[in-house]
Image (cartoon, rainbow, N blue to C red):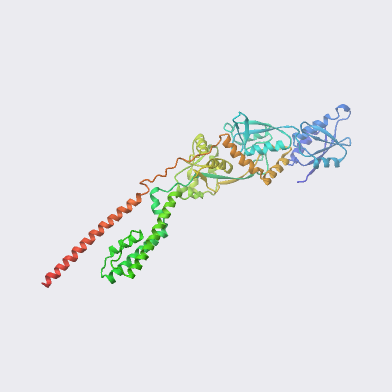
Amino acid sequence: MNILTVVRIDEDNQNASLSLMDQLLWRRHYTSIIVFFEGNEGEEDDNEEEPLINLFHDCWQNGYLSVLLVWHNITYTYTPYPKITVIRLENYMAFEKIQNLRPLNFNGFEISTAFIEYPPRCFSFHSRHGQLIRSGYYYKIVENFVRQYNGSLRPEFVDAWGFKFDDDSIRDLVNNRGFSFIPTHLTASENYESSYFIHFGKCYLIVPAAKEINQNLYLLVSFDMGMWLMMALILIILAAIITVINVLHYHRRLIVESIFKALQIVIFISGQVFQDKTLFTYMLQLLFLCIGLFLTNCYTGNLSSMYTSRIYEADLNTLEDVGRTKLGIHIYSLDYKMYTALENLPAIIYKRFFLGNNTVFNVNRKNLKMVSIYNGLDDTVDLLLYQQLYLKRPLARYIPEPLYTLPMFVTMPHRLAFVKHFDHYICYLADSGILKKFKADSKWDGIMGQTIRFLQDAPPNRAMSLLYLQYAFVMLFFGLLLGFVTFVCEIRKARRERSQISNENGKNN
C-alpha cells in the first residue's frame, strides 16, 4: 500500500502529534512520512542534532523507519542500527534513492526473541560435545532472517508449561517483554501483529494403524466371496455331472457319493471317479484333473503369499471410522473447551472427547503408545510419525480428514519497524523451498536431540501355530460329522431297501 504522510511538528506539540500519527498510521507505520519540524529558537550549534535525535528516537519507538525530516530548509533522515544516527540529505530525491537502494542492515543490532520449547517449532538440545544447539523451523526462520540482515539474535527462554496462555498473558508476553519475535504459534489477535502465513495448518487425529487379522482367518480370506461362490458352483456342477453319468451308464443313483467325489476333485485328491476305462471317462478324468489342479494351486498360492505379506484390517480414513474402535480421544486440558466448541464434526467425535492427565497425554503421544486417540497440528503429527521411518509396519497414522484448519504465522509486536521486510523474507523462504528444508531439518534435529527417537520393530514371530489351523480343524470336524451323518443315512436306507426286498419276496412266495 502506497501512503505518503505529511506532518508538521514542533517541540511543544511533539508528543501530541506523534500520538495522533500513531492512531492514523495504525498498522501502516512502514509507509513514507515527511515531517516539517520546527525546533525552539536560540539553540546552540553544537546541540543542533539533539532535538532531531530525540524526534527520530520517538519515530523509531513507533516503528517509523522511512522518515524524511525538513528542518531549517535542510532535509534529514536516520538509520536506527546499531544506534540512531542522523543522515543529512541534499534533497528529496536523495531520500528516495536511499529508500530504494539501501538494503536492510542491522549492523550488529541485538534483536530479542522469546524461546519457547515446543518441538518442532522451537526447541534446544546439547550435542555430544556439550554445545547448546537451538533448532525448530520457527526459530530457524527468525534466526536466518536476523543473520541475513547482519543482526545479532538474543533468545530468552520462556517456560511454556508454566505459562498461562490466556489473552492477558499473551498480550504481556508480546508487547511488554521487549521481544521482537515469538517463534511459536499463537492465536491471531488484534493485540499483536502476525506475519505472512508460513503455511495453512491442519489439526489431525493420530489413530492406531490397522492391526493384522486373526491368524485363524487366513484359511478363509485366501479367496474372496466371489471365488468361494464360484467353487461352490463348480462343486454343484461336478456333483450333478457325476450323478447323471452314474444314472445313465451305471443305473445307480448315488447322490452322496457323487458329492464326495466332486469334493475330491475340487481339493485335488486323486481317485478314480468311474470304474470303466473308455475314451469318454478318460476325457472326464482329464477335465477333473485340470479343475482340481487349477483350484488347489490358486488357493495354496494365495495362502502362502498372505502368510508372507500379512493381511491387515481396514485403516481409519474418515472421522466417522472412529466409531469402529472403542478408543477415546484424549484432549489436552487447555484445549478442551476449544475442541468441544468445534462445529460440523460427527457426533461420535464429541462423544469420544475426554480429559485426562496432561503428563500422560504428552508421554503416550510422544511414544506413540496408542491406548487412546490423540490430536495435534500437522507439524507436530509429522514429527511424531517420523519416528516410524524404519518400521516395517507403522504403529500409528493420522486420519487425513482435519478437525479444523488455521493459518500458521510468527507473532510480532505492533510498530515493529521491519515487519514488511520479514513478510517478504517468509515469502522468499516459501517460494525457494528453504522452508521445507527447515521443517525436514527440525525433524532430524529432534532425533539428534532425543526429543523423539526412531522406533524399532519387535522381533518377528513367524512360527506356524495351531491358531492358523483352527478353522481347518473346524472344517475337519464338520466334514467328519457330515460323513458320519451320511453313513448313518446310507445304513438306514440300505436296511429299508433290504426290508422292502424281503417283504416282496415273502409276498411272491
Picture coordinates of residue 65 (x, y %)? Answer: 77, 37
The residue depicted at 54 percent of the width and 37 percent of the height is 453
Indicate the quadrant where residue 237 lies. Answer: bottom left
Where is residue 475 drawn, in percent x and y? 33, 54
Could you say where residue 354 lies in the image, as x and y percent from the top left? 49, 40
Residue 435 sits in quarter: top right
Q: How many numbered badges does the structure rendering display?
A: 0
| Residue at 78% across, 44% down | 3
The front one of 380 and 164 is 380
- 500 w.r.t. 414: above or below: below
Relative to residue 488, is residue 85 depicted above or below? Answer: above
Q: Position of residue 343 (x, y in %)?
A: 55, 47
**Foreground pick, 414 / 132:** 132
Q: In the drawing, does residue 124 fall left or right of residue 153?
A: left
**Left or right: 41 in relation to 163:** right
- Pick out the residue farthest to the bottom: 508
In the rendered image, which quarter is residue 48 located in?
Answer: top right
Q: Nearer the viewer, residue 421 or 328?
A: 421
Inspect this view and state whether residue 308 appears: yes
**Residue 172 visible within the image:** no
Instruction: Give the residue drawn at x 15%, y 70%.
Output: 504
Q: Nearer the viewer, residue 320 or 218?
A: 218
If the image is split into quadrants, where does the C terminus sit? bottom left
